[in-house]
Amino acid sequence: MEPKRPQAAKKLFIKTYGCQMNVYDSDRMADALAPHGYAPTTEIGEADLVVLNTCHIREKASEKVFSELGRLKELRDERRAGGEDLMIGVAGCVAQAEGEEIVRRSPVVDLVFGPQSYHRLPELIARAGQGPVIDTEFPEEDKFEHLPAPAREVTIKRGLTAFLTVQEGCDKFCSFCVVPYTRGTEVSRPVEQVLAEARGLVEAGVMEFTLLGQNVNAYHGLDSKGRSVGLGELCFRLAEIPGLERLRYTTSHPLDMTDELIEAHRDLEKLMPYLHLPVQSGSDRILGAMNRHHTRATYVNVIERILNARPDLALSGDFIVGFPGETEADFEETLSIAAEVGYASAFTFKYSSRPGTPGAAMDDQVPEEVKVERLARLNDQIMGQTRAFAQSCEGRVLPVLIEKRGRNPGQVGGRSPYLQAVHLEGPDRLIGTIQPVEIVKAGNNSLLGKIVTVTEPKSATYIESQALPA
């Protein structure tokens, strides 16, 4: 029986920047504070505690945080003038990297804590009454063991899909990346701990998981017998949970695509045929400078092995243009590998120097105008490939997980196996089901479909819990 939770007396507002793992972390912060009387709010003006959950990957990330803190100072001044108060916290990777600097530049901040410390958030709040608190250590204890499970009604409100962190940190030390310095080296959650969280989510109606990790396919959690388990086996174990219909994972490294994981793509129907596998550059010279540990040829070989196992798989990737020393010939290699692989989608970035990384100290930095021009050319090519993939879905019947109401009456929306948004006509009672949908038309950012044959819901539990009309 779930323990009784106190009635919420305070409001919590969390602004989340960056990656999916930060989304997961923000939810877990809310879970940690719920037993202590905090309820989430979407209105920053009514919050008693505001947390900025930051990301250090993007350009000028820290400056965006300081700009937001300036606005929060004005809000707190207004609150104090009215006899009230506001507590302000900075979490995540910027906090981990720049804890002391944040407090020095923004005395308005009460709490600074890194990604490995948010399970201690109630304790940090209690200490903050005596002055600013900074907690950016890498603790020995497993934070996941100290986090309370979310209340069932909270999970239900979050929807049919959920992020589930299984691995944190990275040992690859790519020369452009701050992750090893802000998230630490690779740590994998124990298998039974992951399975227990997964079962709780499924019992509350979650039908699809995206397994998260900075280098998720390096997962090597221990099972109950002390045996190291890889991501492929973990997927097989998760797929056995009744009620779980779909699995995804992100983000991966090419060198950690094991035979076992590729076999999971071949054999597991619940593992969606969509893989995000960053390459970053098509030039071996630049890959070497990036310390990526793979070449263009080894990356393409991995892709070939995966497609041999799962021919209908669609690929997504990451690209960085303008890395120090990148020539026009190097960039042309990036354009050519994107065309050769045939990505269904991709995330593209201009290189931005991250303090403390080897790339920041490299000579031959590429001029900004050159980076802008190259990014535009790559984006044009990738957008063309994305449109072509979407159009290739026209006329196909795809299983679509119906997740929510559409914008207009009588419409519902969901996701294809390839993570595309799909809009179609249908009643609310189909939310929480997977329907065979014929794709009628591909738009710029979504697909328009129609249900071929309605598969009736097995249970109305999810619909009733959301108080949706029939």
Image (cartoon, rainbow, N blue to C red):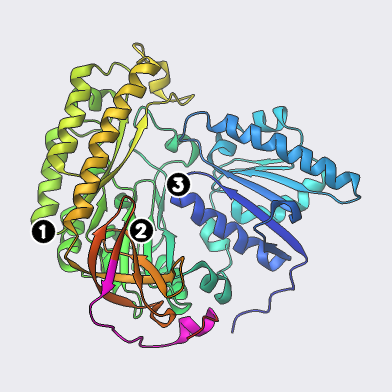
Above/below status of 123 relative to 361: below
The circle drawn on residue 234 is: none
Above/below status of 378 relative to 403: above
Q: Mark 2 = which residue?
A: 221
- How far, Cα to Cα, is label 3 from label 2? 22 Å
Q: Mark 1 = which residue?
A: 309
Query: Of label 1 and label 2, which has the lower sequence position?
Result: 2
- How far, Cα to Cα, is label 1 from label 2? 25 Å
In depth, the one of 99 and 222 nearer the eye is 99
- How far, Cα to Cα, is label 1 from label 3? 29 Å
Secondary structure found at label 2: strand
In magenta segment, residue 76: no
Quadrant hosting residue 288: top left
Using the rendered image of the protein, determine whether residue 322 is visible from the camera's viewpoint: no
Q: Position of residue 315 (x, y in %)?
A: 22, 49
- Write the residue at 42% across / 83% down: 429
- Write the residue at 27% across / 28% down: 377
For the record, the magenta segment spans 449-466
Q: Mark 3 = which residue?
A: 19
Query: Of label 3 and label 2, which has the lower sequence position?
Result: 3
In depth, the one of 144 and 386 nearer the eye is 386
Disc 2 crowd, CA 10 A, few/some/many (<14, 14-19, 20+): many
Q: Depth-wise, is mark 1 or mark 2 nearer the camera? A: 1
Amino acid type for the residue under numbered disc 3: Cys
Q: Position of residue 205 (x, y in %)?
A: 45, 77
Single out the residue that lies furthest toward the front. Answer: 409
Amino acid type for the residue under numbered disc 2: Gly
